[in-house]
Image: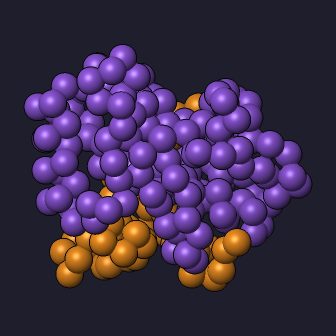
Amino acid sequence: MADNENLQILDEAKLQGDGHSMKDLVFNPATGEFDQVDKGRAPNTGTVVTDMTKDGFAA
Amino acid sequence: MIDNDRMNAEVAVFNFNRVPQNIYRFMDMGTSKPWLAIAARTNVGNTYTLRIELDKFPNEIPKVFVTRMLTTRSGAPMSGVSASMHTLSSENGRTRICHYGSQAWNPRVTLFKIYAKCRLWLEAYEGHRATGRDLDYWLKHQA
């Protein structure tokens, strides 16, 4: 159901949510995948969605 | 309810973000129960379909469902309200994702943002299935 890459992305998202990451989370809708780039660096493809990890989820 | 102008604006946002046009479809437009069907594929390649109900969008937070009942690592249906799993009460046998809260919601939030957020929820769901951790281990709660 998940592999190491999945858990790395999630752990990075957790760090981002806590404000402790030097990476940005990037969602590439064309491939449907999440990736990471160094913070402040524009991704080649995809959309930076780090704010979603900081804003959090309801309920 | 979503109107044609808003739908066209949402499609433009999808296009700008390079969302493939063949993974989503607006359904039952012009009725009292319009909704968006959109596919999501996780990083490990599992696919899900999301149902985003648009009858009160954009003025109210749209209900988002996975089009089937997901189960926890222990096999329990994810049918109820759970803060730690970021779910709300299911309807019609579909797990409901809790994404935006009322304090964070405004009518300018796009369907793309909702989609990306729910896509992240799916990634955390698969993390839960792999590790047993609740989703809020990775996905923080809104303040």
Give the quadrant of residue A16.
Answer: bottom left
Q: Is residue B104 visible?
A: no
Residue B141 position in % (x across, y down): 54, 40
Residue B133 position in % (x across, y down): 75, 58
Residue B7 position in % (x across, y down): 19, 37
* Chain letter, purple: B
Give above or below for B97 relative to B117: above
Query: Residue drawn at (47%, 60%), measured in percent from left and top?
Result: B40
Q: Is residue B112 visible?
A: yes
* Residue extending farthest right: B74
Left or right: A57 as drawn, with respect to A44? right
Q: Nearer the viewer, residue B29 or A37?
A: B29
Give the quadrant of residue B26.
Answer: top left
Give above or below for B104 relative to B22: above
* Placement of the N terminus of chain A among the 4 image quadrants: bottom right
Type of colouring? by chain
Residue B39 position in % (x across, y down): 45, 57
